[in-house]
Image (tube, grey):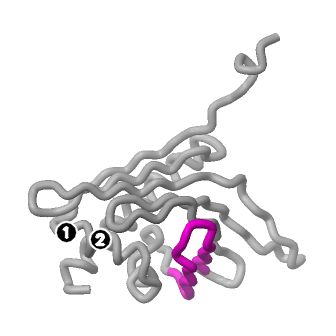
Amino acid sequence: MNDAATTTTRPTARVTRHLPFPPGKVFKAWIDPAIAIRWFGGTNDAPSEVIMDLRVDGTYKITFSPTSRLEGVYRRVDPPHRLIFTWVHVSTLDDGAEKRSLESLVTITLVESDGGTDVEIRHEQLTDEAGRASVTEGWSASLEKLQTLLSDGA
């Protein structure tokens, strides 16, 4: 039997948006913890802490609560056009044990266009279709929050 025939492809979420700001300003919002803490997360999510070691093989941690955080490793840092990083959701269970999601991969691409920036978020290797729907919703809400924040002068 061919191994390729038994391999399942994990879903990918893709979210795009045009932001009326230059790529450098949008990129800075992704890499500056003081800005990211103000927009990152879905509709009802707001981080309490953002730590970033912005370099290839550097790590990040975005804490939402004592029982929920995101963490990963930067794979590519190409200002102001591309950022690639791994993504793992870590939940702390009632007994103190940690439950880690499967690792996925996020690629942020910023392209100057029409006096602003076309943003594409490609979130690959998600666990299932429910996960794809969830991160699509979360990224869409985050970009809405980012646009509002940058419009307010951040």
Q: Verify whether residue 55 appears in magenta.
A: yes
For residue 109, the mark is none
Pick the residue in front: 67 or 17: 17
Side (left or right) of 146 relative to 93: left
Query: Residue shown at 22%/60% (left/top)?
Result: 117
Pick the residue in front: 110 or 96: 110
Query: Residue shown at 64%/70% (left/top)?
Result: 71
Q: Which image quadrant: the N terminus?
A: top right
Query: Residue shown at 47%/71% (left/top)?
Result: 41
| Picture coordinates of residue 37, whole percent (x, y) | 45, 83
| Picture coordinates of residue 48, whole percent (x, y) | 55, 87
Side (left or right) of 140 relative to 105: left
Q: Quadrant of residue 4?
A: top right
Give neighbour class at mark 1: few <14, some 14-19, many 20+ (Cα, 10 Å).
Answer: some
Q: Which residue is mark 2?
A: 26
Give, as a single range, the part of the protein colored magenta.
47-63
Q: Give the farthest residue toward the left.
A: 115
Q: Which residue is mark 1?
A: 22
Q: Verify whether residue 62 appears in magenta.
A: yes
- Compared with 31, 5 (above or below) is above
Give neighbour class at mark 2: few <14, some 14-19, many 20+ (Cα, 10 Å).
Answer: many
| Picture coordinates of residue 144, whole percent (x, y) | 30, 67
Q: Amino acid at mark 2?
A: Val
Q: Amino acid at mark 1?
A: Pro
Contact between labelled residues 1 and 2, with CB atoms less than 8 Å apart: yes
